[in-house]
Image: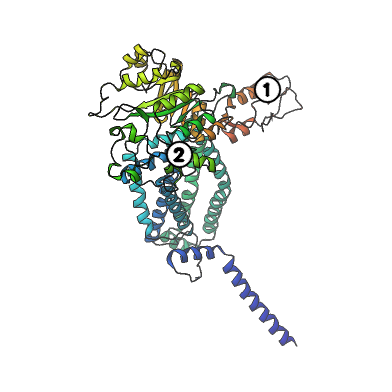
Amino acid sequence: MSTKASRTESRKRRESKKDSSWAEKIFNHKSYITFLTGCYSCHWKFRQWEKTKLGSCCCSRTEQVCCVVLVISFVLSVILLFVWIEISNEYFGFDWVIFLGTGIWVFGSIIFLSILGTLTAYTSLLVVSNTFHVTIVLAILLYMLLLFALFKFWKDKWLTVGLSLQIFAPYIHLCCITVMTLLSWPVAFCVIYLETEVRIRRYRTTYYEEEMLKRCNIFTRLRAIQVAVGLPFLLILVCLYLMPLGIHSPCIQEKEDLGPKPVFFAHRGAPMHGPENTMMAFEKAVEFGAYGLETDVQFSFDNVPFLMHDYDLRRTTNIREVKPEVANDRPVFFNWTFLSTLNAGRWFLDPWRRPYFNMPYQSEADKRRARNQSIPKLDDLLELAKKENKFVIFDLYGPPAKHPLRHSFVKHVTKVILDSKIEPHLIYWLPAYDRGYVRENAPGFRMVGRLYTMEELGKENISTINVDYKNLFYRGFKDYKAANININLYLVNEPWLFSLAWCSRIDSVTTDNIPLLSQLDSPHFFMVSCLPRVFFQAWYRRNLCPHPPSPIPVLLTVQTLGSYLIAGISKSIEMPCDGNVESLTLLSLVS
């Protein structure tokens, strides 16, 4: 009987061991690594993992080099992905450059974003599984090529990345502090465990074992691991705590100091809701509450000023269907009788030619309206602006050498504007040509300059400038604001960039995306500076209260939040002078 029971118990132990082995295979992180290895190398066999002795190296020199290459690839992919996400304000310009080079409209910016996202996910999985693949070397070469191209041909886009850090740096800092706080426990346990292991081994080591350990340097390796784990962590932590000293963001300020919301100039109308530089687009912009209308003016060969941005008709008209042999010619060499017959709206509804990837839904009425759009004259826009009392700002394209208006186009367009009977103060005169003639014959026009010096603006008697946001923020604009110069920024489409302009007290922006930006009631990422007030009230309570207070948890709050507090928390802080009340209260949470 006892023999049978022992056999049964032995069988149960074997089955339990078998089940335990199966469970360990399924619910072990090694299974995850085996799965990733199979995806990348087609080796799906689960192999037993040997436990590495503490202090000894678990991989060869080649594997160590591959690990370094993996980390470099991951870091480069994250940097490129971050850069490309931050310059989303420039996606249309990137796609337009591709069109100029190829003649085909594609969302190259979105395709590039997808590729970078895929590569980042790929390299991150390889880093997690510590699996090297030959494509990593190719990916690193691709990253280096892309970084070189950005530095060489698109250098100004790095300025956009720097501006984005003015907005996001405080939040990145807080997130990093949180991550480092979470990592501090495992790092501390690792360092303590290594220290304990060193002491235990020293205590248990005999003379002969000590001589052997000297030859293999086991204690040195353990100390090296301690330094490799602890020192970088401490250095990163020190840098993070010192980072607020170098963070300058205009969106960290008192709420009372926040300027008025910038007004909008509709860039070529509302090009996300109607074909650009058509009357539909400008009428949509008026519906969205645009402060002014921005456009581009060219001249037909029979002296009619019309609205067109590109130097050919391929992208925004049906010229390829009507006269494909002249599709690449400049529109200024066509008569208005021909230009007025071209359709300037059907391209907008073509899914392969639509200008923006995230265009809103178009109703059937808007689609019918867009299909019937044609190239408008400057007179049409002036009539709409006069009717709706909207400002007009435009770029004026000088005609080429063989054009009839080569030397008199400024006089001609000035006459057209004056003949329209529009109020002169509604015209923002941006062209730099023949300003003296314009001042003499149209003194009511508001002269607009570029990024001129203060001396040039004073000499020209200019009180408004229209500048690229990248150049203005890096050159600085304190002198312009001190001299009461009105500033209009172009081209601002992203909410974070508009928030930066708002916090910087910019007067107006030129944008494609009025409906989105007009919904902002306050700047995104706005933060209230509260550090001086907290320290002052802590000093007040410690020195002027009649009862000696106990330590106040102000420093803990300040150390946790740095030198800024999210705007959702009011700046009102109650510091009662009562020996029995030792609390600090942040009042009035804003919804």
Element marked by disc 1: helix
Which amino acid does the dot numbered 1 rest on?
A: Arg
State yes or no: discs 1 and 2 in contact (Cβ < 8 Å).
Answer: no
Q: Quadrant of the N terminus?
A: bottom right
Residue in the picture at 41% in, 36% down: 374
Which of the 4 image quadrants contains residue 531? top right
Q: Position of residue 575 (x, y in %)?
A: 70, 24
- Is residue 244 found left or right of 582 in the rendered image? left
Q: Position of residue 433 (x, y in %)?
A: 31, 20
- Residue 189 seen in this snapshot: yes
Q: Which residue is mark 2?
A: 372
- Is residue 107 found left or right of 330 in the rendered image? right
Against 103, residue 575 (above or below) is above
Name the residue furthest left: 402
Q: Which residue is mark 1?
A: 541
Against 565, residue 143 (above or below) is below
Discs 1/2, front: 2
Residue in the picture at 32% in, 46% down: 102
The residue lying toward the viewer, choosing from 261 and 319, is 319
The residue lying toward the viewer, choosing from 237 and 227, is 237
Residue in the picture at 49% in, 43% down: 358
Name the residue furthest right: 580
- Residue 242 seen in this snapshot: no
Against 358, residue 298 (above or below) is above
- Is residue 325 found left or right of 228 in the rendered image? left
Element marked by disc 2: loop
Q: Earlier in the sequence, mark 1 or mark 2?
A: 2
Q: Residues within 10 Å of mark 2 (few under 14, many from 20)?
A: few
Q: Quadrant of the C terminus?
A: top right
Q: Position of residue 227 (x, y in %)?
A: 47, 48
